[in-house]
Image: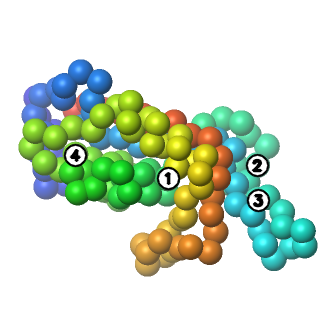
Amino acid sequence: MFVLFGAVALAGDPPSGNWWSTDCYSSGIYFNDTSTNPPTRVYTHPGDAGFYYDWMLTRHVCEDDFSPSARYLEGIGRCVANEEGYSINGALSWSSCAAHARQGFFGYNDNGDQDYSQKYVGNAEGRGYLPGQ
């Protein structure tokens, strides 16, 4: 079986513990609203402790930790291996999502450029996918 992600065809299963594509799910993500005195925390999902798919964190992790061997594809919202024979390490993906969320990451503006005006912080985990998932 092969799957076509963008312009990359990935055949078969990756090595054990690896994935063809990954994304990040986050919980308790907030930014500090500095327009108030003192600054207030603004949560992206207030009052809910569940984990949510986080496209900004997924893109941030993909571009910071896995490029150029993988790239963020907006159409599916995942970090996708873009080289034949390359797959994304599952443990590294999970820990990268968690570390970037804990340390804080910047979002993106409407033009797709990184927006350094707000730093998002919280908890996260990575998830991985095989062909057809």
Cα separation between marks 2 and 1: 18 Å
Name the secondary structure under disc 1: helix
Amino acid type of the residue that numbered disc 2 sits on in the rendered structure? Pro
- Where is residue 104? Give x, y as percent: 59, 55
| Amino acid tagged 4 | Ala
Is residue 129 rendered to the left or right of residue 40? left
Q: Determine which quarter of the picture holds residue 14.
A: top left
Packing grade of label 2 (10 A; few <14, some 14-19, many >=20) is: few
The quadrant the C terminus occupies is top left
Whether residues under marks 2 and 1 lie with C-beta atoms below 8 angstroms apart, the answer is no
Q: Could you say where residue 26 lies in the image, as x and y percent from the top left?
A: 58, 43
**In the structure shown, which secondary structural element does the residue marked by tag 2 occupy?**
loop
Residue at which label 1 appears: 57
Q: Which residue is mark 3?
A: 42
Disc 1 from disc 4: Cα separation: 17 Å
For label 2, the residue is 46
Q: Earlier in the sequence, mark 1 or mark 3?
A: 3
Cβ atoms under marks 4 and 2 closer than 8 Å? no
* Residue under the image location 76 percent in, 59 percent down: 42
